[in-house]
Image (cartoon, rainbow, N blue to C red):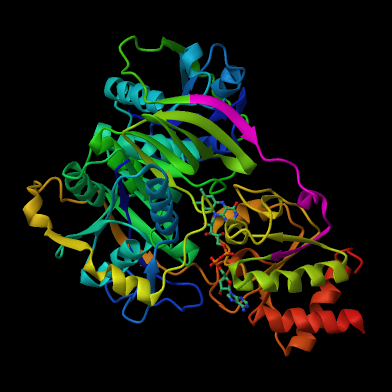
């Protein structure tokens, strides 16, 4: 009976949501594969969530050291490599987050275990693990299989699985010291830096008029702003609009921007990449306008309009002015 | 500071009805337009900016077919000094194989810094960059939004979720995967591309690299690609723009927002 590892992602003494989601899927897989679930915490001394995790896993391995208080992918890679050598888990699950992207692929090379990244599902077919991914920014799905190996790695997309509820496990806690002979790390954490607050707070708006790359050029941003004002709403946007400096960062919706919860979210020319739609899961009603009827945004929207956004914006303005 | 930048040419798939090829392993690409991967465009710009400030050479590398040289010429026009294309023949490529090939090429090029994009817009793996770092034994960081070199190290910003950055120091030689928005990529004119035609563009056949069969065997392979299930999704509002606008305003009002 093999193990499934879930690498616990945490920050400032708190579990990240992706951890609960991985535990949900790992618990399901353990049932169909008769494996046992091991949560691996790499962190500072006495992280406050150890107890909580014992209810959700068969065992909790804790590697603790003050040097591990702040995330460092190099330490994660080295420590996980040794744990994998020692315990031979069939599968190691890692969040497809900036941190998981840092140490997941290198860990694959170091262990020789194949990795599938950014997976939205994990399947067992004829006793073999398969992963489902999205390609072309969510326009297509792809089912992948691994070369034969003693173990596999998968990074999991945020939001792909529901959060795990407190379970009946009574996991044992196995505390381990940080190995003494770790190589020197090449990267040193200095500080976290939070984005400065902006002139508007898109998280408080009831109505967001949100523009994406479909807005075309900088001058067109004013057209959307005018509409937002006429509607009594607030202007927000997807990442490319901020990347091009057409709007300040505090307008950005998504994983690297803000999570919003308006009553209505009107998406104009946004394709619906997961990093964007992760930020609108709290929206009441989503209305999307996009020229491309196959745009992934239509899969999460409540209402869709397949048309040129400028035509719709003009028509909205006409009606509002009348 | 000598910099190697890894770039990829990708199909543009927004506003396109993608068709799946008969083998169900890929989309049909014959009708698609191509461009430099968005993330790589920021990576090459960052390399050129660093070169302009600190001196050194910039080499752009791609693993791809002859048509992919288009993105290398673009890199040369932006300010790269030379370019290398590795011809993969009919090899199957996955992040492992691509990173293994890139590592072998980059070993032969002087570098203090290797830059890649965070991910490519087609397969969205986000894996090649940091795998490459491991093959080369380089220090690395993923999702980088600022690079400020100082002597043999750099202060970098790593983008986390929700607008939080992690500020770290990293020692050279290092590999950074570059996030969009880090700079404003310069405009490339046809003239610029023509002028850069004089710069060196070397083509290497993958067989010349001396890699083993294991090195060139994918670790992950596609069983099948498929369209998302049709059942889920939005209720489509039909009609001319005027009718649609009225319906949108009605929905907004119904949801308790006053306009
Ligand atoms: C680590 C990481 C973090 C990220 N964080 C975020 C984030 O926080 N927020 C975010 O948004 N993205 C984020 N991204 C980027 C994300 O992956 C996508 O690249 C991005 O969301 C695409 O933005 P878009 O939909 O505006 O542009 P595109 O994907 O280019 O889509 C533009 C859409 O506009 C449509 N269109 C074009 N013209 C018109 C017209 N005239 N009328 C109607 N429709 C039109 C097109 O059909 C297309 O669907 C992140 C990526 C990474 C790797």
Left or right, B156 with reference to B31? right
Above or below, comparing residue A95 to residue B32 in the picture: above
Residue B105, above or below B237: above
User: Who's the residue at 38% across and 27% down the image?
Assistant: A74
Residue A167 appears in the figure: no
The image quadrant of residue B7 is bottom left
Indicate the quadrant where residue A224 lies: bottom right
Which quadrant of the rendered structure holds the C terminus of chain A?
bottom right
Q: Position of residue B46 (x, y in %)?
A: 43, 50
Q: Which of the pair A192/A282 is nearer the observer?
A: A192
**Image spot of residue A104 (x, y percent):** 38, 37
The reply, left or right, for residue A282 in relation to residue A54 is right
**Within the magenta stretch, is there residue B247?**
no
Q: Report the span colored magenta.
A: A189-210
The answer to whether A21 is drawn above or below residue A134 in the figure is above
Where A307 sits versus A169, above or below? below
Q: Which residue corresponds to the image point at 74% horizontal and 87% vertical from the top-left?
A: B241
Image quarter (top left, top right, bottom left or bottom right) of the N terminus of chain A: top left
Q: Is residue A245 visible?
A: yes
- Observer-nearest of B51 and B229: B51
Q: Residue B177: which quarter of the image?
A: top left
Along the line of sight, the residue nearer the viewer: A119 or A280: A280
């Amino acid at each position: 009976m093999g193990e499934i590892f879930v690498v616990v992602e945490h920050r400032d003494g708190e579990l990240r949501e992706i951890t609960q989601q991985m535990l949900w899927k790992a618990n399901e897989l353990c049932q169909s594969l008769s494996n046992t679930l091991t949560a691996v915490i790499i962190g500072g001394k006495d992280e406050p969530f150890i107890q909580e995790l014992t209810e959700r896993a068969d065992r909790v391995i804790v590697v603790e050291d003050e040097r591990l208080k702040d995330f460092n992918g190099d330490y994660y890679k080295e420590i996980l490599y040794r744990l994998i050598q020692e315990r031979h888990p069939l599968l190691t699950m890692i969040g497809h987050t900036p941190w998981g992207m840092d140490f997941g692929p290198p860990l694959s090379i170091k262990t020789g275990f194949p990795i599938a990244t950014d997976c939205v599902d994990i399947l067992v077919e004829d006793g073999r693990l398969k992963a489902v991914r999205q390609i072309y920014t969510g326009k297509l799905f792809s089912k992948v299989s691994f070369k034969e190996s003693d173990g596999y790695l998968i990074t999991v997309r945020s939001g792909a699985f529901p959060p795990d509820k407190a379970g009946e496990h009574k996991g044992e806690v196995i505390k381990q010291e940080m190995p003494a002979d770790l190589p020197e790390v090449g990267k040193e954490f200095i500080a976290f830096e939070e984005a400065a607050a902006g002139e508007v707070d898109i998280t408080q708006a009831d109505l967001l008029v949100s523009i994406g790359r479909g807005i075309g050029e900088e001058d067109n941003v004013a057209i959307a702003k005018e509409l937002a004002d006429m509607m009594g709403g607030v202007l927000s946007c997807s990442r490319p609009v901020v990347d091009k400096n057409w709007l300040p960062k505090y307008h950005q919706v998504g994983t690297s921007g803000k999570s919003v919860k308006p009553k209505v979210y009107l998406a104009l020319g946004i394709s619906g990449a997961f990093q964007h739609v992760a930020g609108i899961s709290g929206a009441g009603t989503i209305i999307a306008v996009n020229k491309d009827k196959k745009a992934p945004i239509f899969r999460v929207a409540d209402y869709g309009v397949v048309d040129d956004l400028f035509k719709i914006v003009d028509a909205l303005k006409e009606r509002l002015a009348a | 500071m000598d910099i190697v930048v890894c770039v990829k040419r990708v199909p543009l798939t927004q506003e396109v009805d993608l068709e799946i090829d008969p083998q169900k392993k890929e989309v049909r690409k014959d009708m698609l337009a191509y461009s430099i991967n968005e993330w790589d465009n920021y990576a090459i710009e960052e390399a050129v900016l660093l070169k302009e400030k600190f001196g050194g050479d910039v080499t752009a590398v791609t693993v791809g077919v002859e048509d992919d040289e288009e993105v290398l010429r673009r890199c040369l026009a932006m300010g790269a000094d030379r370019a290398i294309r590795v011809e993969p023949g009919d090899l199957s490529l996955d992040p492992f194989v691509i990173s293994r090939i890139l590592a072998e090429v980059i070993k032969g090029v002087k570098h203090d810094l290797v830059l890649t994009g965070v991910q490519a817009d087609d397969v969205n793996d986000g894996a090649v960059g940091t795998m490459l770092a491991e093959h080369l034994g380089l220090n690395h960081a993923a999702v980088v939004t600022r690079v400020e070199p100082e002597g043999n190290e750099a202060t970098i910003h790593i983008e986390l979720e929700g607008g939080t950055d992690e500020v770290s120091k990293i020692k050279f030689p290092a590999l950074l995967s570059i996030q969009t928005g880090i700079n404003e990529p310069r405009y490339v004119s046809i003239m610029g591309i023509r002028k850069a035609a004089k710069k060196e563009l070397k083509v290497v056949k993958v067989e010349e690299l001396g890699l083993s069969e294991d090195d060139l065997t994918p670790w992950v392979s596609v069983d099948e690609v498929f369209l998302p299930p049709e059942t889920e999704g939005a209720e489509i509002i039909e009609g001319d723009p005027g009718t649609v606008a009225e319906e949108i305003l009605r929905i907004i009002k119904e949801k308790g927002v006053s306009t």
